[in-house]
Amino acid sequence: MERAEMEMFLTLSEELHFGRTAERLHVTTGLVSKTVKKIERRIGVTLFERTSRHVALTRVGRVLRDDLLPLYEGIRRAIDRAELAGRGITGTLTVGFMGTQAGRIVSAAREVFEQRHPQCGIRVVETHLHHHATQLRDGTADLLLMALPVDEPDLTVGAVVTRGARYLCLASGHRFAGSDAMSIEDLEGETFIGVPDTLPDYWTDFHLPRWTPGGLPVGRHAEPCTTYAEALALVAAGRAVVPGDGQLLVLYRRPDIGFARVVDGPQIEHGLVWRTRDDGDLRVRSFADGVMEIAPALLPPGMPPAVQGR
């Protein structure tokens, strides 16, 4: 199968609409239909069930999509790397990370990037809770691997790098310490850490909700924490609880704190974020590709790799 055919098949597998697929690929709807029929004749099996109102993958189509996607992404990255090497990447890229796991991933991606682009340097900095995306706006970082969500008109959210179950970090003597079946409703009467007002409300409400789904109140500590170390100090003292993902159990284990898995809470995601005006920056694009290559091997046990994109 040629690369153009793979791209058309995978795009239609995602869109499940011939018109939208044609629009994305800047071709005609007729060409999309013709190409899909050509692939089906070659393989000898129907890949899409289609009517005038409905398009869906067949069982064989789903298998082919799952097998082709990683191969296509590998081809795309290889071609991108060749193009970038030909154009040359120079200067310095500053990459920020939020959390220990993000720091490990960024540091490993720097090694890959600098081997491929020795004329471009990477500077790694830490971003804390109170920063959110301010380092992108003030120019002290060009790219961040940080906790999502991020919903800002001047920022682009790229690939989700990690996606895992929600855990709660609590004092070691807490009644739910060690539980693997805590519910969001169990947060009634608990107190989350406080955070600075530099964090947008949508981010704070997602991670530190003031109410359970059943309408029960959840508190927030009066003193804002600017770093995760400060948050853990409050947790250890039994004054607050703080959410996180599976990296807590591996990278933040201490005798004075415990963990509980929240079985019905939304998953925690970390993703790559950069200034939208830098969408065409070859350094950003190449570093992001490197992160997606090396991240799966660095994830804690039990945390599956996130899929490409949102």
Image: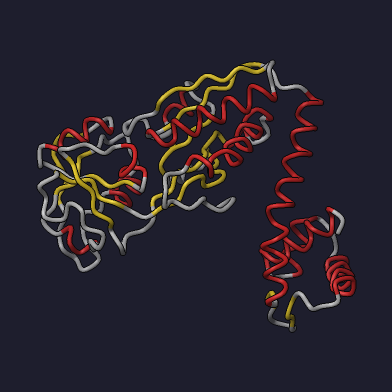
Q: Quadrant of the N terminus?
A: bottom right
Q: Where is residue 202 in the image (x, y as percent from the top left)?
A: 35, 49
Compare residues 165 and 191 and report the one nearer the observer: 165
Q: Where is residue 213 in the image (x, y as percent from the top left)?
A: 25, 66
At a point 43% along the width and 51% down the height, the residue shown is: 303
Q: State whether residue 86 is above or below residue 49.
A: above
At a point 14% along the width and 48% down the height, the residue shown is: 191
Q: State whether residue 153 is above or below residue 12.
A: above
Q: How is the image coloured?
A: secondary structure
Q: Where is residue 65 in the image (x, y as percent from the top left)?
A: 70, 64
Compare residues 21 and 114 and report the one nearer the observer: 114
Q: Quadrant of residue 262?
A: bottom left
Compare residues 277 and 3 and report the one nearer the observer: 3
At a point 44% along the width and 30% down the height, the residue shown is: 103
Q: In this view, does 100 lie to the left or right of 295?
A: left
Q: State whether residue 153 is above or below residue 179.
A: above
At a point 20% along the width and 64% down the height, the residue shown is: 185
Q: Position of residue 257 (x, y in %)?
A: 18, 41
Q: Is residue 3 left or right of residue 178?
A: right
Q: In which quarter of the image is residue 253?
A: top left
Tally the numbered discs. 0
